[in-house]
Amino acid sequence: MTRYFEVEQRDGAARIGKFLLSPELHTPCILHTAELGNLETPGPIVDAGSLWSTKEPGEPEAGIKEIREKVGDETLIILPHQAYPPAIPYDARGKTETSAEGTAGTGTEDEEIKEEGPTGVLLKVGEIPGKRDLYIMEGAGNLENNARKFLKTVLDLKSRISPDSALYTPNLALPENVATLVYLGVDILDDTRTEIAAYSDIYLTAAGRFHLDSLTEFPCRCKVCASTTPEELLALPKADRAKLLAAHNRDTLEAELALVREKVRGGALRDYLEGQCRVRPWLTALLRLADFEYTYLEERVPTFRKNQLLANTSESLSRVEVVRFARRIQERYTPKGPEILLLLPCAAKKPYSISQSHQKFAHALGRYRKFVHEVIITSPLGIVPRELELTYPAAHYDTAVTGHWDEEEKAWVSGCLEAYLSKHRYTAVVAHVEGAYREICERTAEKLGLEITYTAGAGESLTSPATLQKLRNTVETLCSSEDISRKSRNTEEAKLDLVKGIANYQFGEDAELLFPEKGEKVQVKGRFPKHQLFAGKRQLATLVPQYGTLALSLEGAQLMANSSKSVVQIDDFVPRGSILAPGVIRADPGIRPNDEVIVLGERALCVGRAMMSGSEMEQASRGIAVALRHVKKL
């Protein structure tokens, strides 16, 4: 919990934030370690080092107070953490050592020090944190190339500190790894490694590191690189050469971090990271291991983004947006209506229904289309019911199309189809597919003992007149069978099923509250995709075409207020704008950033969009929790 650090924007665990210091410090940022210990001309953050060097033994508070008086109330002090030198007798350390070693705890001295201004503290694994603005990971620089231990340490620290406190990993940042560190939730970095590299004649880039004598030319046009050559630089004295090389290394690190910040602001850090992590094997391993920690990332990843999701690597199959979509279909979605399942391939154009191939499928089915339930097979999402083709990320992804599927893709997609058909049984299954799509269907059919009717042979085009006619004839024959109910949906019922499907995906089982069986008739108005849900004359929700999600009205929020999900409880006040985290009493832990939420208080009913997860709303002391759209005074 902090009074000085505020998260302004999130992209999963990565954050854009600011420290309310003098001068104001925006994160993620690079600290210049050479300036941290300078108390004469302090920057926004200073390191108190060790109390033995700043005061008389036995007076721990006095040393901190002296530093605070010197640097001012708007400078963050990293509390003493350095070990005593052997020359200091143990019996002379007394209270000093106890205080220095226990600054991460919650003792009386700890609370008093905090009240004097912003502070940071070295937090060891297993220690109980106090209330600090900044936490420093102990020994971060020793964890390079140990992906498993580094990730375990980050997750341990993040689980124990407040979500609106900053995390600092010293002696670790390089241009090649800064994207990964920020992606995992690191807010503060430093230039220690760039300085060390310079004195070892190592030239740093975002694509890796080079020994100076291996370069023929500089792949950079910074001030240093534009004014000299590797040969000229090598001819300089060691100290002069290191000074110039350090300037380049720092500039490269700052430039890479600036790019990472822009990726965070655009919600595209993951897309960038999937390529950038290839620079070093341990970074690739770190990303893959992080994906196994689904809960940590999923809690922080928004339910939709404005930008396109790029699925160009094998890691795309395990990213949160893809896995969450597949899980919600399995856990929340329930198909309505027809007993005949029609499996179709995906299309490059999104949503699928506006692509030429899917329009030809629909035209071929004609009046028989109302008797089938369409499900699209695709990588990396697995399967997409037609009702959810607008819902993020189904209409928002792009992937490299080569016509060849690797084994990992086939296993993932067939697993999604198998899970779906294990839960939802149809009287008949038709597959209008070819190539890898057919192989996936055959695998699933063999595992589940299902019979699937295929409407295209090997090498046949799915959009040829012959195969389209076979598709129509197959469905027509099934509809005339005694085993198939000829129950069909009219246009109004089809639109209602679409909205119900989206509501189930979005709200889970509590979505049924939006469709009361008694009272006014519930219907959908408006042409696709601009559907609006009404109960009589009361508008309950609107389908937002950009993201394929439902935006509730106050009337819809009133119906959903009895739900235990998607609800944020606030204190006794009427909001006049966005709701800040301190005003939240309780929040559904299942709430994710960008979720549609209902806000309840003694004096107000509101509806809006979550700006942070439900658990963060409860724990944070700063920041916008919910961006409100409608407010009703009770």
Image: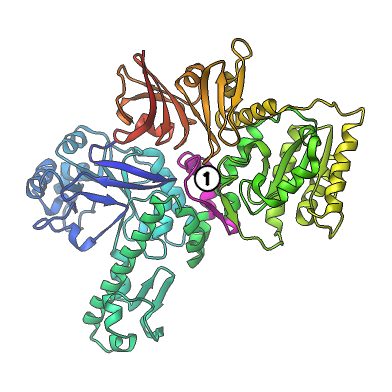
Quadrant where the C terminus is found in the figure? top left
The residue located at (76%, 33%) in the rendering is 370
Q: Amino acid at mark 1?
A: Glu
Q: Position of residue 530 (x, y in %)?
A: 55, 34
How many other residues sit within 10 Å of disc 1, few (<14), some (14-19) or many (≥20)?
some
Q: Is residue 139 magenta?
A: no
The residue located at (44%, 70%) in the rendering is 207
Q: Position of residue 205 (x, y in %)?
A: 39, 71
311 left or right of 160 in image: right
Q: Work out whether 151 lies above or below 561.
A: below
Residue numbers of the magenta segment: 288-315
- Pointer 1 residue: 293
Q: Work out whether 236 lies above or below 623.
A: below
Q: Work out whether 253 lies above or below 270.
A: below
Q: Work out whether 470 lies above or below 143.
A: above
Q: Nearer the viewer, residue 585 or 241?
A: 585
Residue closest to the far top = 519
Quadrant where the N terminus is found in the figure? top left
314 left or right of 608 in image: right
Q: Is residue 454 visible?
A: no
Q: Is residue 313 magenta?
A: yes
Q: Is residue 585 visible?
A: yes
292 left or right of 620 in image: right
The residue located at (73%, 39%) in the rendering is 374
